[in-house]
Amino acid sequence: MLLVIEQLLNGLQLGVTLFLMSAGLTLVFGIMQVINLAHGSFYMIGAYVGATVTLHSGSFLLGLAAALLATAAVGMLVEVTVLRRLYKKDHVDQVLATFGLIMFFNELTRIIWGRQPLFMDVPSWLSGSVEIFPGITYPSYRIAVIGVGLLVALFLYLLFAYTRIGMQIRAGASNREMAGALGINIKMLYTLVFGLGTLLAGLAGVMAGPILAVEAGMGESILILTFVVIVIGGIGSVRGAFLGALLVGMVDTLGRAFLPTLLRLFLSPAYADGAAASLASMSIYILMATILVWKPRGLLPAHA
Amino acid sequence: MFRRLTRKTYVLSAGALLLLLLPSIMQLVDEPYLISLFSRILIYALAAVSLDLILGYGGMVSLGHAAFFGIGAYVVSIFSYHSFDGSPLLTWPLTLQGQENALLTWPAAMLTSAVLAAFIGALSLRTSGMHFIMITLAFAQMLYFFFVSLEAYGGDDGLSLMSRNTLAGLDLTNDTTFYYLCLTLLCTFLIIAYRLVHSRFGMVIRGSRDNAKRMQSLGFPIYRYKLVCFIIAGAAAGLAGALIANQTEYVSPGLMHWTRSGIILIMVLLGGTGTLFGPVLGAAAFLLLEEVLAIYTAHWMVYMGPFLILVVLFARHGLYGIIVGREKDNG
Amino acid sequence: MAEDLLRIVNLCKGFGAVQACNNLSLEIRAGELHAIIGPNGAGKTTLINLVSGDLLPDTGHIYLGDQEISQLPLHRRAHLGLARSYQITSVFPQLTVEENLLLAIQAHCGHSFRFWKSSNTDSQLRGELLPAIEQVGLTERAGIRAGNLSHGEKKQLEVGMALACKPRLLLLDEPMAGMGPGGTVELRKLITKLKQQMTILLVEHDVDAIFALADRITVLVYGEVVATGTPEEIRSNPAVREAYLGEEVQTC
């Protein structure tokens, strides 16, 4: 029972991290109709900047602020210089150009920070554990991550439901021409949305810093998970991204944690562990395939 | 029209002659080790042409093509592993022993890739556009992680081959022989692909790229045609994989990592989509560029990245378009 | 007159709050040229899309002959003898005029899992190509990429491709839209000729052309049928004059 609750929280933590990644990206896909592979790079940039500033200043919050500023700034710069030229091009072109961006950013971080991964400490004021139920403790830092993720989800919900700019973004996501006809400054809106997306990716990156190793290429593994989330949730749908992120986070974490035990019920231990490892690593893709057969456009598609 | 035709014929014959004479030239300039680099180029060219069949002619932007490449490589290696180990590869539902004979393992590699392509294609082709890109990518990553966790065959570390496969009467360990074998297979596939894109089947594929809705209202059930095209491309990539396993005598999950799919895609775009010889040029250009840049800097990707962006923004027709003429070749 | 080739029964289709097709029933008799007119937003193109299979209805039925087709996919309907042209030209821009038509011919020449023989030199396909290309007057332009044709020529090709399918029922969605006067005359001649050979459902804005060509006319307003009848009946129908013709006269 203890283990189950702990793993559920781990799943939730992965889920909110994925939500931070996919919320911005799904908007970029939905609104600008551009496939951006380089989203993971902003996660990496966020982690690197956050780790470096934290190491030098000793303040995690300063590192966090710097990471957010840096990813939003770099994001908007990339949008203005490269992405903007890709909106009217084929998806293949977008894939190639953003792949080029990944190569560039990965190698650039290697040049600046070297090939050795950076390690980032959990800030001291979050280094303890919290007793969430009698007898069950969970690291404060991870709880903070979950809290931040849920707050961002709430913030996005309020942004889209109640503010003018949120409605403009939604209008843009469901109908580009219409949004243009309504007199919304599309160019400006695109840059802002892209900046918001990269900022959220940077937030995810800096929060993952103390949990994972900060290294070049760290953005790609989470990028693929982000894609799975977006496919499951439906392109352009932030609600879908939230649902998909939690699903993927849970299935991945619980699969890795409990599949070996589960399979040992049916198979010999040697076989069970091997099969469980394979199955666990494929579980979210199987989930994606299943949902795809059932709903090709995702669970909560934006363009219904 | 006529001038372009002659220019194309001229360029193609020159290219063919160069490829034919390459091993001798390398011997002459006393750089024989380069032959294996050129074998690599031919193998990647085969993978790139197969991708262009679905990408350039079929309009299906797959970012998971390396999955089929990697599977082909693994099939050959697993057969070879069991052949040396003496243990059976399968005991159920049928008994399968290890195998060294290329005439058996290479078709097996193609078949496995084709079956996999049928599965992945059947699911991904239910969607299109961005969904298709992400889904093919995700399935390829699924296979990547599957092989990473497959400890029996080396997991993350991969699997070494004891030796290259055997092929009746040929010494595949000889790099020159291997080079000519790769060249023959590439040319064979180019001919097949040429016939394919000009056949009725090819017309359906090209029509679906241009205007899927119109194809359906003309009466074509395009899903099944696209799926068959996807399977053919997958099988050809599987053959390329079988070759690369023999060439490097080593396989690892990295062969099917999505960045590998990206690189094959780059080759196609660099050379020119919707052309058959473009991807060959693209493969050569990419691998040679990588080789040359790597001499000067370990950080060659920091130059390659912006270079790709410039290609997209300014040289959309690829190398083939630059060399043979802007008008895209339909064959 | 002849029996009904197409029967539309209580068809409904909505897009959000807009009801583009509201409990619509309509019969198209075999051999007639049936025209649909109506103000912008009356649901004319939606109706064509529902019949052709580009859209699926929310409720209601469509029968081609005796067969219910309202849920069949596009390509199945094409094989039952439906062919259409699109309002916004829908050709294959990267293929030549000849290849465009060859594809249309190929569509009804059995399956296309033929991998080896070149379709350009396929005698079965080529045999039908010449009349098809002549019919729409594009013989001179055979080798040109469809993307490089003028707007009028694309429209002609569009109709040519629908014809190459040898349909029982031809659906034409504003074939004359955006055409110069010369092209319109040509197309009218062509449609007059086609009238002898097949049943046609025509959506068109050019009221003159419709009254000259159509055997029967249906007037559509807000997704509902206001009236159906011969051109004379429609001309003298007070409801139509109020709902459509009057307005049209003023705006033109």
Image (cartoon, rainbow, N blue to C red):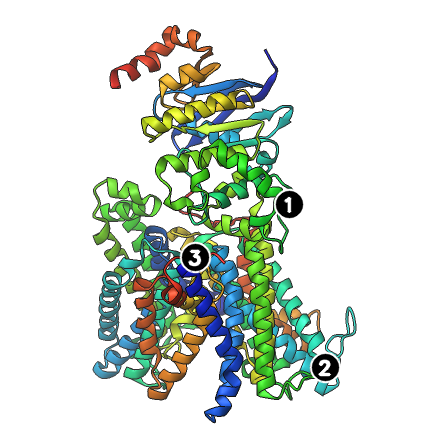
Res C58 seen here: no
* x 20%, y 48%: residue: A185
In terms of image quadrants, where is residue B2?
bottom left
Residue B168: assigned label: 2
Q: Residues within 10 Å of mark 3 (few under 14, many from 20)?
A: many
Discs 2/3, front: 2
Residue A230: assigned label: 3
Q: Report the side of C239 relative to B117 (left or right).
A: left
- Amino acid type assigned to the residue bearing label 1 in the image: His
Asked if C51 appears above or below B144 in the picture, the reply is: above
Q: Residues within 10 Å of mark 1 (few under 14, many from 20)?
A: few
Circle 1 residue: C111
- Amino acid type assigned to the residue bearing label 3 in the image: Ile
Asked if C159 appears above or below A240 in the picture, the reply is: above
Res B242 seen here: yes
Q: CA distance from mark 2 to mark 1?
A: 39 Å
Asked if B108 appears above or below B101 in the picture, the reply is: above
Discs 3/1, front: 1
Q: Secondary structure at mark 2?
A: loop
Tag 2 near tag 3, CB within 8 Å: no
> Could you say where residue C208 lies in the image, as x and y percent from the top left?
36, 17
Q: Report the side of C65 relative to C224 (left or right).
A: right
* x 51%, y 41%: residue: C101
Discs 3 and 1 lie in a common subunit:
no
Q: Secondary structure at mark 1?
A: loop
Q: Report the side of A264 relative to C169 (left or right).
A: right
Q: Secondary structure at mark 3?
A: helix
